[in-house]
Image (cartoon, grey):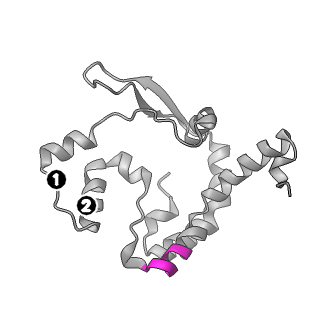
Amino acid sequence: AKSFEGIDQLYENVYYHADQFLKGAYALYVDEWIRAFGHRRILILRTEDYWADPTSTISRAFAFLDLAQLPPAELHTIATRPVAYLPGSNSTFSADKRVANRIRAVPTPASAPGHTLTRVPLPMPTEAATLLHGFYAPFNAELAKLLGDERFLWKDV
């Protein structure tokens, strides 16, 4: 049996991009994880919080995992590393990822050996932001309720 998206490249392109919207409806998935594992065994972090304060986010993850905290100098080294592009299973769609994430890759300073790119956020067009906030609002409200954390309403983005 053929899948809908396998019928023609035209449908594959539509399905892939529609699927990306569903992946952002986190409440649909987190609810299942909570029922399977319980609240205390799941830590959900926002990427925005990591980029804003990587040190605190890393420390929070270590605490959740009941690991010893890193020495401040080591934590600082990890938290300030530039991001390098690492192709993954969706590497075919790397250009799509950059558009979806509104990221521009730029060379890093020579003082960061082994790292070639860093991420520079680009502003999202107002119309796109309005549409996305409207689409995700009910999912985000459910997620914030599930997690007991209003940051997951994403009012700050």
User: In the image, what residue occupies the spot 45% across and 78% down?
Assistant: 37
Residue 124 falls in which quadrant of the image? Answer: top right
Give the amino acid type for the residue marked by disc 1 in the picture: Leu
* Magenta stretch: includes residue 95: no
1 and 2 marks in contact (CB < 8 Å)? yes
Q: Is residue 108 above or below residue 47?
A: above
Is 59 on the left or on the right of 24, as rendered?
Answer: left
Is 62 on the left or on the right of 141, as rendered?
Answer: left
* Magenta stretch: includes residue 37: yes
User: In the image, what residue occupies the spot 62% across and 57% down?
Assistant: 23
Q: Helix or strand or loop: what does disc 1 sit on?
A: loop
Pointer 1: what residue?
A: 70
Between 118 and 132, the one lying in front of the other is: 118
**Could you tell me residue 30's position as x and y percent?**
53, 70
For disc 1, the neighbor class at 10 Å (few under 14, some 14 to 19, many from 20) is few
**Could you tell me residue 77's position as x and y percent?**
21, 39
Pointer 2: what residue?
A: 62
Between 123 and 145, the one lying in front of the other is: 145
Give the amino acid type for the residue marked by disc 2 in the picture: Phe
**Could you tell me residue 4's position as x and y percent?**
84, 54
Which one is earlier in the sequence, the residue at label 1 or at label 2?
A: 2
Q: Which residues are magenta?
A: 31-38
User: In the image, what residue occupies the spot 79% across and 44% down?
Assistant: 12
For disc 2, the neighbor class at 10 Å (few under 14, some 14 to 19, many from 20) is some
